[in-house]
Image (cartoon, helix red, strand yellow):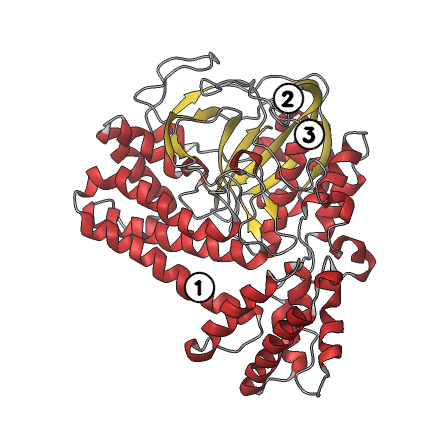
Amino acid sequence: MQFKLDQLNFDNRFIQELSGDKITGHTPRRQVEDACYSLVTPTPVSHPQLVAYAKEVAELFDLSAEDCLHDYFTQVFSGNQQVKGMESYAMCYGGHQFGHWAGQLGDGRAINLGEVVNQKGQRWALQLKGAGLTPYSRTADGLAVLRSSVREFLCSEAMFHLGVPTTRALSLITTGEQVIRDMFYDGNPRAELGAVVCRVAPSFVRFGSFEIHSARQDIELLRQLVDYTIRTDFPHLGEPSTEVYQTWFHEVCAKTAEMIVHWQRVGFVHGVMNTDNMSILGLTIDYGPYGWVDNYDPDWTPNTTDREYRRYRFGHQPQIAAWNLTQLANAIYPLIEQVEPLQEGLNIYSQAFIVGYQEMMAEKLGLQVYDAQTDKALIDDLVKVLVLVETDMTIFYRLLADISTETELSDADLLIQLSAAYYQPEQLTELIKADIIAWLRRYIARVQQDKSDDMYRKQAMNAVNPKYVLRNYLAQLAIDKAEQGDHSMVQELLEVLRHPYDEQPEHQAWAEKRPDWARTKAGCSMLSCSS
């Protein structure tokens, strides 16, 4: 039988054009010098079973449903078989973790299968997460468990359909193996079902990919990687040179700003914005202890490791991205040897984020354009109103779109229309109610200045304010079922999250506030970095 997978066009430029590890094998916890990657093969698994696949990602490779449901697909994307053209490897990179240089990190549980050029001429790297030991595996086994894999698979696709720059996920496969994990690092490890996710992106190169060579003062290898990245992923900039390096950094800064604006728009919190988790393409990468803000709280982080200092909290993500870009600037400085163009890039980030954020907030509020004279104060005061009581961010904006600006509403009617967004209505004191109503009156007056009808405004707001996001408790419900062998909710959520801005009344239950039982339940509030 002829399989479509055997017809994929692998060119594998990453390992063809860059220096590789001189040592082969899976021996973990060793320093890999003078190399951008190490050749390594996935660890075979005993009983792989397909949980779900993303049809839109499969279509990038001209794979049909029949192709994806065949056992050959499962064997390949669990790591048991390789198709013609695959050359598997793990990438070498370093990074700053929680603000401190961590040295060599690398793909400790991810193995790249190679890069495919599809029929449209697009380049897509395929990567298995949870595929076994690599030289960069530090204290773990290179494997992943079902719960983290469900979260990675669903979130990758949810973010894409939300319009957020992201890596993609082709498949989710259980391995039949038991993996030992201490979920909360509290000395209570247990066996969990293993799984592998096939991740897809034009490139998995990170800020840390450049940092490691700069830190080792291997300037020629740093130049080799930068030149490869420009030629492969930024060819429109021209042949690499000092001037092109500067332009390239400026574009990376602008792309990063765009990504962060989208995160803030949908209420996404990455949870572990280390420089090794920052894509050079401005893509959301490495879905670990992420989360969506349920009740609006700029200080919320989903990462238990970050509980004390909250470095990666929701409201701090823009500043952290700027800090990370500064580390990238430091890493590539030896190629440019000028401070000014690098500082210009950081300024580009700041300006792009500020302008992008203002425009984004105007869109969320249904305003035709951002007017600094009126809208900065309106937006700043909205943030203050949202934290007066526990207010569900996602639901609030959808309800705000329904408020009439064409008919006179009483104060009581205005509050009633927003009531479904409040977790604890009893917190609404008369003083708080007055503050909310005062803001709503200002908002209505501002909308009336635009002279746009309510139907048009609602359509515009609902196109940027999602109704459905991957709330932590929804992901946990899907995980609980999947761990019992029932994959139906994974597949149902995948389908619902394909259309996050549509009403989908048959799935209304997935758009409700976080239930009270999920407020502190494991996996529904904060998560650890444990896989």
Asked if the residue under mark 2 is in contact with the one under mark 3, i.e. CB atoms within 8 Å, the reply is no
Does the rendering let one see residue 146? yes
Q: Earlier in the sequence, mark 3 or mark 2?
A: 3
In this view of the protein, which residue sits in the foreground, 89 or 66?
A: 89
Q: Nearer the viewer, mark 3 or mark 2?
A: 2
The residue depicted at 57 percent of the width and 72 percent of the height is 365
Give the residue type at disc 2: Arg
Which of the 4 image quadrants contains residue 367? bottom right
Question: Which numbered marker is on residue 508?
Answer: none
Give the residue type at disc 3: Leu
Report the residue marked by disc 2: 181
Asked if the residue under mark 2 is in contact with the one under mark 1, i.e. CB atoms within 8 Å, the reply is no
Tell me the CA gap for discs 3 and 2: 11 Å
Above-or-below relation of 528 to 524? above
Report the residue marked by disc 1: 356
Tell me the CA gap for discs 1 and 2: 41 Å
Report the residue marked by disc 3: 146
The residue depicted at 41 percent of the width and 59 percent of the height is 353
The residue depicted at 50 percent of the width and 39 percent of the height is 272
Q: Position of residue 510 (x, y in %)?
A: 76, 53
Q: Earlier in the sequence, mark 3 or mark 1?
A: 3
Q: Position of residue 508 (x, y in %)?
A: 79, 58
Q: Position of residue 358 (x, y in %)?
A: 46, 67
Question: In the picture, which quadrant includes the C terminus?
Answer: top right
Tell me the CA gap for discs 3 and 1: 36 Å
Crowd around label 1: few <14 · some 14–19 · many ≥20 (10 Å): some
From the viewer's perspective, is 256 left or right of 306?
A: left
In this view of the protein, which residue sits in the foreground, 304 or 271?
A: 304
Does the rendering let one see residue 85? no
Q: Nearer the viewer, mark 1 or mark 2?
A: 2
